[in-house]
Amino acid sequence: MSIDKIAILLQDVKEHRADLFPIVARVRAIVLATGPSITEEVKYGGLLFSCGPSFCGVFPYKAHVTLEFSQGAALADPHGFLSGDGKFRRHIKLETLQDIETRHVAGYVAQAYAAAEC
């Protein structure tokens, strides 16, 4: 995906949802640091991360950000933060920067990355 589209999306979040931008930026940094060969693209109004298969995405909404896991139903949820009851997807709702740490985002992202067999 074009870096320009990613930059445009990030700038849009920064301008129109300034309170959510630090959450999006921090989650993005965590995902990209999780392993080699991770790519990102603008899709579905957010950033979708792949390493071959897509494994997660970060999506800003009006008052929160969701971290979506493509195969989240198969992930272990030792902390009880995964929401959703669809066949495959699960998400973690993030309302503050502190939620990233208290909801163990890095651990869930690492687990999703490993499950994608990247």
Image (cartoon, grey):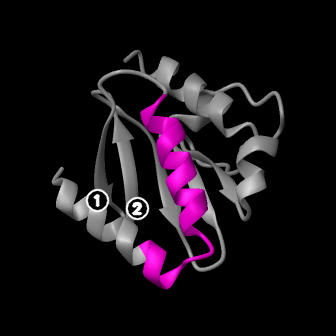
Residue 91 position, x and y percent, is 62, 49
Q: Which amino acid is tagged 1?
A: Ile
Q: Residue 97's spot in the image, x, y percent?
A: 71, 57
Write the start and end of the magenta stretch as one range: 13-33
Tell me the quarter of the image containing the C terminus.
top left
Q: Which residue is mark 1?
A: 6
- Asked if the magenta segment contains residue 45, the reply would be no
Instruction: First in sequence, mark 2 or 1: give its number.
Output: 1
Q: Name the residue that disc number 2 marks.
A: 46
- Which image quadrant is residue 53 in? top left
Residue 109 place in picture, x, y as percent: 57, 33
Would you say residue 18 sits in the magenta stretch? yes
**Vertical position of residue 30 compared to residue 1: above or below:** above
Residue at x 83% of width, y 39% of height: 80
The type of residue carrying mark 2 is: Gly
Task: Specify the principal SS of the magenta part.
Answer: helix
Q: Position of residue 22 (x, y in %)?
A: 58, 62
Q: Are marks 2 and 1 in contact (CB under 8 Å)?
A: no
Residue shown at 60% from the left, 59% from the top? 23
Distance between the alpha carbons at the discs numbered 2 and 1: 9 Å
**What is the tally of numbered marks visible in this picture?**
2
Mark number displayed over residue 58:
none
Snapshot quadrant of residue 10: bottom left
Left or right of 29 on screen, residue 106: right
- Pointer 1: residues within 10 angstroms few (<14), some, or many (20+)? some
Which residue is rendered at x = 49% and y = 26% of the image?
Answer: 34
Depicted 75 relative to depicted 24: above or below: above
Q: Is residue 48 above or below residue 108?
A: below
Q: Is residue 76 left or right of residue 89?
A: right
